[in-house]
Amino acid sequence: MELLIAAGVPSAIVAFCFWLLEKRIQERAEVEKNERACRQREQDEKEENREKLQYMMLKALDGSLCLSEATAKAVQRIPDAKCNGDMHAALNYELEQKHDLENFLTRQGVNHITGE
């Protein structure tokens, strides 16, 4: 009987220590999991804000292009304006770039939808 007690007490102490250690490891893992989830939410929010900013920048660029196109066409209609070739070349370049941007954004949208 004494032998069982002598062997059982250290085993119980070791088992208790392992239980405490496992509990601490699980608590630490839970804290790290919560921290990762928090960082992921922050990263998702930053990415969403970046996407919104890019969208607003594209809309502002589109508005600027439309305004410059309308201004160039209005100036061309003024009889006394005497538009030189630079105005016509700038307008043609603006239209070309505007269409290239629209085509690029369309391709990106299609690629995003199809998952390519």
Image (tube, rainbow, N blue to C red):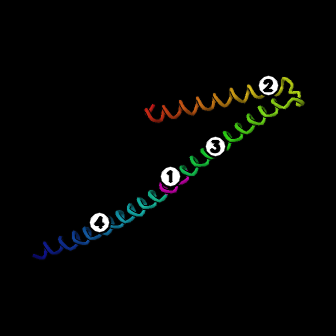
Disc 1 target residue: 44
Q: Hey, what amino acid is under mark 2?
A: His
First along the sequence among labels 1 and 2: 1
Q: Residues within 10 Å of mark 4 (few under 14, many from 20)?
A: few
Q: Residue at x 73, y 34 (%)?
A: 69
Number of numbered discs overlaid on the protein picture: 4
Q: How much space separates mark 3 and mark 2, taking CA atoms? A: 24 Å
Q: Is residue 101 above or below residue 29?
A: above
Closest to the observer, 27 or 4: 27
In the figure, residue 72 lies in which quadrant? Answer: top right
Q: Residues within 10 Å of mark 2 (few under 14, many from 20)?
A: some
Residue 88 — which label? 2
Q: How much space separates mark 1 and mark 2, taking CA atoms? A: 45 Å
Q: Secondary structure at mark 1?
A: helix
Q: Residue at x 54, y 32 (%)?
A: 106
First along the sequence among labels 1 and 4: 4
Q: Residue at x 48, y 35 (%)?
A: 112
Q: Residues within 10 Å of mark 1 (few under 14, many from 20)?
A: few
Q: Hey, what amino acid is under mark 4?
A: Phe
Disc 4 target residue: 18
Q: Residues in magenta? A: 39-46
Q: Hey, what amino acid is under mark 1?
A: Asp
From the viewer's perspective, is the residue at label 3 or at label 4 nearer?
3
- Is residue 43 within the magenta segment? yes
